[in-house]
Image: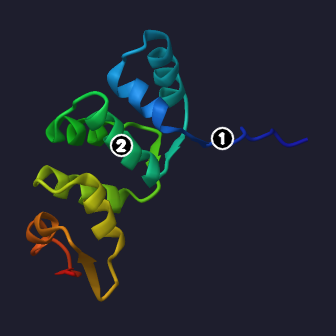
Amino acid sequence: MPPSSPKPAAVRAIDTNIVVRFLTGDDAAQAAKARDLITEGEIFVATSVLLESEWVLRGAYDFTAGQIVSALRGFAGLPGVTLEDAGLASRALDWAEGGMDFADALHLGRAEGCSAFVTFDRRLAKLAVGLSEIEVVMA
């Protein structure tokens, strides 16, 4: 009988609250569980989880944009962490570092291939100039 090969590690998707506990450590028991979960194997992180994590860190924990970008980049770079769309997340974090709202950056990045990105947001339109191939148009 041939030797059995090891089973591939199961990839587990995680929720926003796992990311937030990992990054903030505000609840020691949950932070320890989050750390163990994230360091014990392969983790999948949906783009929507990144978006909600940014929102929670900014709104509930008063993280600055710079702190959020640094925290999410560090988290995304951990061994075993796979982002749903790493290229999109990287661009959005770069744009957020330059002053764009992270959600707007994700929306703009996801719109690649469209003829235009239409908004009422003057600040977004101004910040987007030259960042993307898609034209940002004021409605």
Residue marked by disc 1: 10
Q: Nearer the viewer, residue 13 or 82?
A: 13
The quadrant in which residue 70 appears is top left
Dot label at residue 76: 2
Dot label at residue 91: none
The quadrant in which residue 3 appears is top right
Farthest residue to the bottom: give it.
Answer: 115
Task: Give the x, y percent position of residue 22.
Answer: 40, 25
Instruction: Give the vertical position of 98 relative to 71 (above or below).
Output: below
Which quadrant is home to the N terminus? top right
Q: How many marks?
A: 2
Query: Label 1 amino acid?
Result: Ala
Residue at the spot x=71%, y=38% of the render?
A: 6
Left or right position of 122 against 30: left
Left or right position of 106 against 66: right
Q: Of label 1 and label 2, which has the lower sequence position?
A: 1
Query: Label 2 amino acid?
Result: Ala
Residue at disc 2, secondary structure: helix
Residue at disc 1, secondary structure: loop
Left or right position of 1 against 5: right
Task: Give the x, y percent position of residue 52.
Answer: 40, 44
Q: Nearer the viewer, mark 1 or mark 2?
A: 2
Q: Nearer the viewer, residue 91 or 52?
A: 52
Left or right position of 103 against 33: left
Task: Give the x, y percent position of residue 42.
Answer: 54, 39
